[in-house]
């Protein structure tokens, strides 16, 4: 365990479904991140939250909707996804945006059918 | 952020030192060199970072050349569990962590 917990570990959803990914950290970190890792591709940064405020959105389609209710929890709400959205979704946290180390969770393996 | 160049893959014999190179010839003075690794289907794991001095921790050593244009991550005694993709990342503290393709290290028995 890294201190960053992601649930569920695996998720299969239809293109018309609505689901949410959850990330939780109890490391006392103030910045949280969503990354996407598609097959054979590098990790792509999706969203950045610092002290619960979204500070970066890397041109992510609106069918992905992040939510950060507090510094310990981060959600990624999914709706009307496409099969090409199938990927490993990784959450990370750091002390703040300028801090050296990011701690990653184990990810949620999402399959859209 | 400065671009990095790493070999696509490397092999290393178990018990031997694994030396993973990284070129970052356009690195700026305020950019750090970070190393992360990702074991298959898990999240990346922080290994080590440095600015210009060589660094060592319980996992690895980081050697940065004097001109800072390249660096080498050294795993002193590689084990099978060190098989992973290793990412060399150059980053200023004000920037986010951006990953490239990394080096697939395979430790052979």
Image: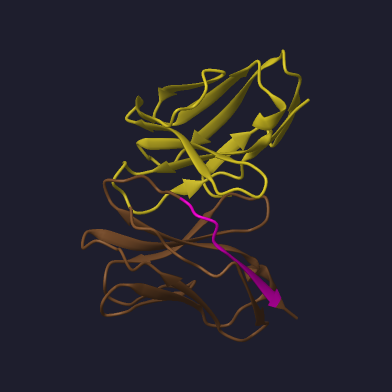
Chain colours: A yellow, B brown
The residue at the far right in this view is A113
Query: What residue is shown at x 28% (from left), y 67% (from top)?
Result: B51
Give the camera-side residue of B32 and B15. Answer: B32
Position of A8 compared to B97: left or right? right
Q: Looking at the image, is B70 positioned above or below residue B102?
A: below
Give the camera-side residue of A16 and B15. Answer: A16
Residue B56 appears in the figure: no
Occupied quadrant, residue B103: bottom right
Q: Looking at the image, is A103 positioned above or below residue A47?
A: below
Q: Looking at the image, is B60 positioned above or below residue A68?
A: below
Q: The C terminus of chain A lies in which quarter of the figure?
A: top right
Give the camera-side residue of B108 and B5. Answer: B5
User: Residue B81 at x, y = what percent?
Assistant: 67, 69
Residue A95 appears in the figure: yes
Query: What residue is shown at x 68% (from left), y 31% (from top)?
Result: A84
User: Residue B40 at x, y = what percent?
Assistant: 68, 55
The residue at the far bottom in this view is B16
Position of A113 compared to A37: left or right? right
User: Residue A75 at x, y = what percent?
Assistant: 52, 25
Residue B18 covered by magenta stretch? no
Q: Looking at the image, is B69 positioned above or below residue A13?
A: below
**Start and end of the magenta stretch?**
B99-107
User: Residue B71 at x, y = what percent?
Assistant: 39, 74
Position of A71 compared to A90: left or right? left
How many labels sit on residues? 0
Query: What residue is shown at x 42% (from left), y 36% (from top)?
Result: A32
């Amino acid at each position: 365990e890294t201190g960053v917990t992601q649930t569920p570990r695996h998720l299969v959803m239809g293109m018309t479904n609505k689901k949410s990914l959850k990330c939780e950290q109890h490391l006392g970190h103030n910045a949280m991140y969503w990354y996407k890792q598609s097959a054979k591709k590098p990790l792509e940064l999706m969203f950045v939250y610092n002290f619960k405020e979204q500070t970066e959105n890397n041109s992510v389609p609106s069918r992905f909707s992040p939510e950060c209710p507090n510094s310990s929890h981060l959600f990624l709400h999914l709706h009307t996804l496409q099969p090409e959205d199938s990927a490993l979704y990784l959450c990370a946290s750091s002390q703040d945006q300028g801090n050296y180390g990011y701690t990653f969770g184990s990810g949620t393996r999402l399959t859209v059918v | 952020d400065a671009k990095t160049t790493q070999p696509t893959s490397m092999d290393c014999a178990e018990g031997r030192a694994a030396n993973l190179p990284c070129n970052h010839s356009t690195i700026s003075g305020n950019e750090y060199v970070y190393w992360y690794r990702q074991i298959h289907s898990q999240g990346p794991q922080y290994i080590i970072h440095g600015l210009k001095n060589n660094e060592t921790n319980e996992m690895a050593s980081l050697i940065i050349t004097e001109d800072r244009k390249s660096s080498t991550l050294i795993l002193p005694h590689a084990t099978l569990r060190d098989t992973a993709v290793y990412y060399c990342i150059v980053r200023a503290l004000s920037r986010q962590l951006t990953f490239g393709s990394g080096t697939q290290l395979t430790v052979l028995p």
